[in-house]
Image: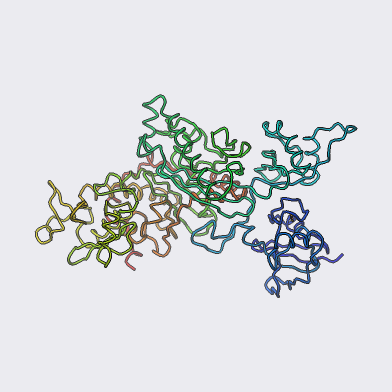
Amino acid sequence: MTDHLVLFMPSGKRGRFPTDTPVLEAARQLGVHVESVCGGRGICGRCQVEVQEGVFAKHGITSSNEHISPFGGNEIRYAEKRDLKAGRRLSCTAKVLGDLVVDIPQDTVVNAQVVRKDSDGRVIERNPAVHMCYVEVDEPDMHKPLGDLDRMLVQIKNDWGFSNLQIDAYLYAQVQKILRKGDWKVTAAIHEPFEGGPAILVALYPGLKNEAYGIACDIGSTTIAMHLSSLLSGRTLASAGTSNPQIRFGEDLMSRVSYVMMNPEGREGMTKAVREALNELIGKVCKEGGIERTDILDTVFVGNPIMHHLFLGIDPTELGGAPFALAVSGPVNVRACELDIEVNPGARVYMLPCIAGHVGADAAAATLTEGPHRQDEMMLLVDVGTNAEIVLGNKARTVAASSPTGPAFEGAEISCGQRAAPGAIERVRIDPVTLEPKYRVIGIEPWSDEPGFDEQAKKVGVTGVCGSGIIEIIAEMYLTGIVSEDGVINGELAATNPRIVLSGRTYSYLLKDGEPKLMVSQNDVRAIQLGKAALYAGIKLLMDKLSITTVDNIGLAGAFGSFIDPKYALVLGLVPDCEIAKVKAVGNAAGTGARMALLNRTHRREIEHTVTRIEKIETALESDFQKHFVNAMAFPNKVDAFPRLAQ
Ligand code: FES
């Protein structure tokens, strides 16, 4: 029999197959994930592909629609009933007749847009841990006393190959009703976290259930962000965020640990609070996505170690001091109901592994997204919060650490600081001659010196300065000579310029007069110096570990990293010298990593393996930390040069 070359795009996987091989079968043999709920009966439509026509010289293939079997039987019926888009074929029925280039359409893979904001053309194929498997079960027969469930299991094994299937206990009581309701046709949701590993029947639906959903969630100490995605198409249906209610127990991580230490009910209270907030968010995304909670069959959560522990109901006290022992560092796989998460009773929770006592599953997720471990270039990945999580490395070697940056970068402990919200100044420029500022405010379109600003400001109000604004204003103060390299506000300017004001024994810069008056004080500059020195010293220790003096590219993750202007991060020396074009905000990389792990179980294996290879550095124990910290107190740095900043 003649063999034909079949190339699957976008994965580029290729192989030779005999005439009449179903395209779906060819994909399976090559390890290309094409969804199939109905098991090739031509009724679910999940297995759609498109044939690319033309000469593909690079691949040595001439592909044509003539090289695939014509529409027939089930495919015609599906096309008539369901409106199969032009050019689409059902891969379970269409057969290979000649050389083919087959495209898995964008709604059946997760495209780069879904998983990354800065699309680089990378396409992530879906391979979720949950399979929806439709089966038609034999009706009961007095002469064959096999139970209803047992006959269904035989059918699942025959049609889908799952043997030794385990069953969630709650289903035993439901199976007979569901089988009869579906007239002996049911869809089994099977959770198989590892390819070929143990599989569990987690939910059962009457008839064809042609959808399954999952949530990916980043539990930040300040904000919780959640995405609802279809496990069968990869599409994100809804996203929502909320403040972490644990804030009422303590603003930053350490104060939450202290709260647990001081209050016998503290841990329980915070666990309950975060789970309630998660359940509320789940309700919100389900409403927006038009689905029921019980349609959610898989969930992925990430968070820093303290958020991770509190979500799991673990006392985080050990993380409050050396040796910062994690109760569990590996991946967590449990039933969602065991953590009071209100979704389908059979749904699972997967948590990515933590890297170290202060470098959590969120940093692991960001690593998965940005992939320093997949690069030749040396990448620095920084998630700036009250505690910065730092990962540095490339394909050959990766190291990680955390550094106590304090809350200044989030606008806390700054006299005019506030969280990023409408009314907060987020961008600042200072005239180098007059020292007059102009600024931009969240929720107000024009800059403060442009027409229309005053009108909008009356409605929104200008209330303070958020983290990115603080960085910009102090960087501008440094660039215009208001602040020296050592971080001292130049009091001599007060004699000639009303913007420099004596406050007690030090000077302040008047950013905004009127109500409220916003000043940047000497203490504010100090708070930023302390934060950025801690961050830089942590990075420096990792660079020392790898014996490098420069990095090739930098990813700034997290909410703060998304808004910070890379130029100002370099001006102040938050991060080491790097080509500005290669310093990028990578958005909520942790949330994206959670989505990748939700939609593709091979990413779970990838990050689990990577985390075991990452070398952990405990900054508090390194003798050079202090030296690097002192040098980094200066703008941009006492000893390290920033030659590329000048270019
Ligand atoms: Fe269901 Fe092809 S697998 S239509």
Closer-to-camera residue (11/145): 145
Asked whether the viewer can see residue 628, the reply is no
Residue positioned 50% across, 47% down in the render? 226
Q: Position of residue 580 (x, y in %)?
A: 39, 64
Locate residue 388 relative to residue 513 in the image: left or right: right
Q: Which residue reaches farthest right?
A: 143
Closer-to-camera residue (144/411): 144
Quarter of the image where the N terminus is located: bottom right
Quarter of the image where the C terminus is located: bottom left
Q: Is residue 8 above or below residue 419?
A: below
Which image quadrant for residue 50?
A: bottom right
Closer-to-camera residue (229/527): 229
Asked whether the viewer can see residue 452, the reply is yes
Q: Position of residue 309 (x, y in %)?
A: 48, 35
Q: Is residue 437 above or below residue 64?
A: above
Closer-to-camera residue (159/471): 159
Q: Position of residue 67 (x, y in %)?
A: 78, 69
Indicate the quadrant of ligand 1 in the picture. Answer: bottom right
Residue positioned 78% across, 53% down in the render? 41
Q: Which residue reaches farthest left?
A: 495
- Colour mapping used in the image: rainbow
Q: Which residue reaches farthest top?
A: 264
